Image (tube, rainbow, N blue to C red):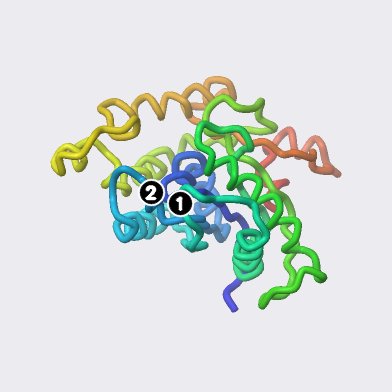
Amino acid sequence: MNPPLDLLAIGAHPDDVEMTSGGWLALARKQGYRTGILHLTAGEMGTHGTPEMRRQEAADAGAILGAEVAFAGLRDGFLHDDDASVRVVVDQLRALRPGVVIAPYFTCHHPDHEAAARLARKAVHFAGLKGYVTEQPAHRVHRLVHARYSRHFEPSFHVDISDVMETKRQAIMAYRSQFQTVVEEAGQPLTRMSKAGFLDQFFSLTAGLGLKAACAHAEAYLVESAPLVKDPLALLRQGPMQHLIR
């Protein structure tokens, strides 16, 4: 059995996690934590790229971030928090045994992202219950946090990703099939993500969060129930990440 993960990010499609949480994953790995990514689908409904291409790109992105990569094998475009899907994700959580789980937020432009948020919440809860019987023993996740894709919530905390921005950028760029040059060469229709200037526009979001958090670039996260802090001064001096991850 592999050692447990300190931090696991769950996304509906390959590239979701890298865009919302690639910075925190890169930073956590740099700090010596064990990290992982769970892609719920292979992005097979996407306009560009085959499932095989997306899986290879996900593996490349994971290697850049230093994160283990797993796939849940659920259907792109048909994500639901039904009993069968919850059971699949519970088994993944019990196998990977993460301390902290990052999930999408419940309000988003993409219905699969919203479904992934509900699915992650249910799976995190049931993974810790001995009465919920699967092939894996119960595992209790320490905390579930939600990643901010755009402006859907006021964050509970920011993570300073200034020192790992280039790593986050490279991980996103690993998804070559989704970007302009490859799409134009294949004569395929442009999507919002594959249009010229998308990445510059996207990274203005992390810069804007950095401006708010007094750093160059940041990612934003929401904790539904505030953590209990025994040393508030240490929290305020060092930042919330260390207290959430341990």
Image coordinates for residue 63, horizontal then vertical, percent: 39, 59
Most foreground residue, 110 or 178: 110
Secondary structure beneath disc 2?
Answer: loop
- Which quadrant of the figure contains the C terminus? bottom right
Q: Amino acid at mark 1?
A: Asp
Percent across and percent down for residue 220 are 59, 33
Task: Determine the residue positioned at 25% across, 33% down.
Answer: 190
Counting other residues with Cα less than 10 Å from the Cα at mark 1, is it few (<14), some (14-19), or many (20 or more)? some
- Relative to 218, residue 16 above or below: below
From the viewer's perspective, is 188 left or right of 85?
A: left
User: Number of marks in the image?
Assistant: 2
Which residue is pictured at 63% across the width and 63% down the height? 84
Q: Quadrant of the N terminus?
A: bottom right
Q: Residue 24: percent from the left, percent from the top?
A: 54, 44
Label 2 and label 1: CA atoms lie apart by: 6 Å
Which residue is disc 1 drawn over? 76
Contact between marks 2 and 1 (CB within 8 A): the answer is yes
**Percent from the top left, x then y, of residue 219?**
54, 34
Q: Amino acid at mark 2?
A: Met
Q: Is residue 173 above or below residue 53?
A: above
Q: Quadrant of residue 129?
A: bottom right
Depicted 218 relative to depicted 53: above or below: above
Residue at horizontal 53 percent and vertical 20 percent from the top: 211
- Residue 153 seen in render: yes
Q: Which residue is mark 2?
A: 45
Q: Does 142 sit left or right of 19 as displayed?
A: right
Residue under the image location 66 percent in, 53 percent down: 100
162 or 152: nearer the viewer: 152
